[in-house]
Image: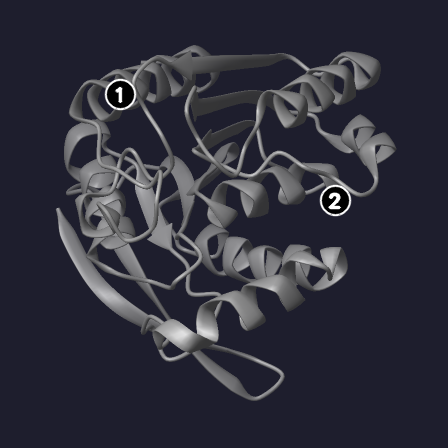
């Protein structure tokens, strides 16, 4: 497995993602990895490398803030709030990175996935809602709210979301609205609700950063296994 940082531009703004490619020369499933709200850290980078190393996928951890660095703490909520309110821009930043991934010579365009954490999970869902050619979508402790629920009809891939039952920013009402949205659109979807888990349950770096944000090892392991099975079902083993 080989990994490297990769530079790209959107409107003259420099972004730096992290690309991981398995050994070999054959076409492989391609998976876009979308980081948490504070920015690209080793959490998302390491998940891209695991996809390449464990599953043999071509994976790109995108950067949606620029320079491949996390934001300063006082910038996170203003920047995140602005992007959350701009559905078109969220989809655009994800779509540009997806095309960068799919331009790789090892990427198999018939087996494409998107996965993400926190707002990155939302971004992965927004790719599908925007009609991007994504066959499997996975969200980990991902925001589920959607200002345009009828756009779910554009999702052509299978969806899996993994949510902590005690997540302070994804309450049961948001889960219920998501269920109604997916059902109304006829999406092939699953939701796993993990006991004992709050927000950021996959991320040791976020542990204790805010009330209700804790790493939870059982849910981290279980959600990764669920993701593997989801991808195997869609892409083949």
Q: Tag on residue 130? A: 2
Q: Tag on residue 219? A: 1
**What crowding class fits label 1: few (fewer than 14 Cα within 10 Å), some (14-19), or many (20 or more)?**
many
Residue drawn at point x = 57 percent, y = 28 percent: 171
Q: Position of residue 26 (x, y in %)?
A: 29, 37
User: Which is more toward the observer, 133 or 158?
Assistant: 158
Q: Position of residue 57 (x, y in %)?
A: 30, 36
Coloring scheme used: one colour
| Picture quadrant where residue 118 is located | top left
Residue at the front extreme, as displayed: 211
Task: Tell me if residue 126 comes above or below residue 9 in the rendering.
Answer: above
User: Which is more toward the observer, 181 or 98?
Assistant: 181
Task: Tell me if residue 167 comes above or below residue 204 in the rendering.
Answer: above
Residue drawn at point x = 19 percent, y = 51 percent: 205
Task: Tell me if label 1 and label 2 are in contact, CB under 8 Å.
Answer: no
Answer with left or right where residue 217 lies relative to residue 192: left
**What crowding class fits label 2: few (fewer than 14 Cα within 10 Å), some (14-19), or many (20 or more)?**
some
| Picture quadrant where residue 156 is located | top right
Image depth: mark 1 or mark 2 in front? 1
Q: Position of residue 69 (x, y in %)?
A: 31, 74
């Amino acid at each position: 497995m080989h990994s490297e940082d990769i530079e790209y531009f959107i409107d003259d703004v420099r972004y730096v993602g992290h690309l991981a490619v398995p050994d070999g020369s054959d076409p492989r499933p391609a998976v876009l990895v979308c980081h948490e709200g504070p920015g690209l850290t080793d959490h998302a980078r390491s998940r891209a490398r695991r996809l390449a190393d464990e599953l043999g996928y071509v994976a790109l951890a995108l950067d949606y803030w620029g320079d491949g660095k996390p934001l300063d703490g006082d910038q996170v909520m203003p920047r995140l709030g602005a992007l959350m309110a701009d559905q078109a821009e969220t989809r655009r930043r994800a779509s540009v990175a997806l095309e960068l991934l799919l331009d790789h010579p090892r990427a198999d365009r018939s087996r494409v996935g998107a996965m993400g954490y926190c707002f990155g999970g939302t971004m992965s869902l927004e790719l599908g809602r925007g009609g991007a050619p994504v066959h499997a979508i996975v969200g980990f402790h991902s925001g589920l709210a959607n200002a345009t629920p009828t756009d779910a009809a554009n999702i052509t891939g299978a969806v899996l979301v993994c949510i902590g039952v005690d997540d302070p920013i994804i309450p049961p009402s948001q889960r219920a609205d998501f269920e109604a949205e997916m059902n109304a659109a006829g999406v092939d979807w699953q939701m796993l609700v993990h006991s004992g888990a709050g927000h950021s349950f996959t991320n040791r770096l976020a542990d204790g950063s805010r009330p209700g944000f804790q790493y939870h090892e059982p849910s981290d392991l279980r959600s990764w296994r669920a993701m593997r099975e989801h991808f195997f079902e869609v892409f083949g083993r």
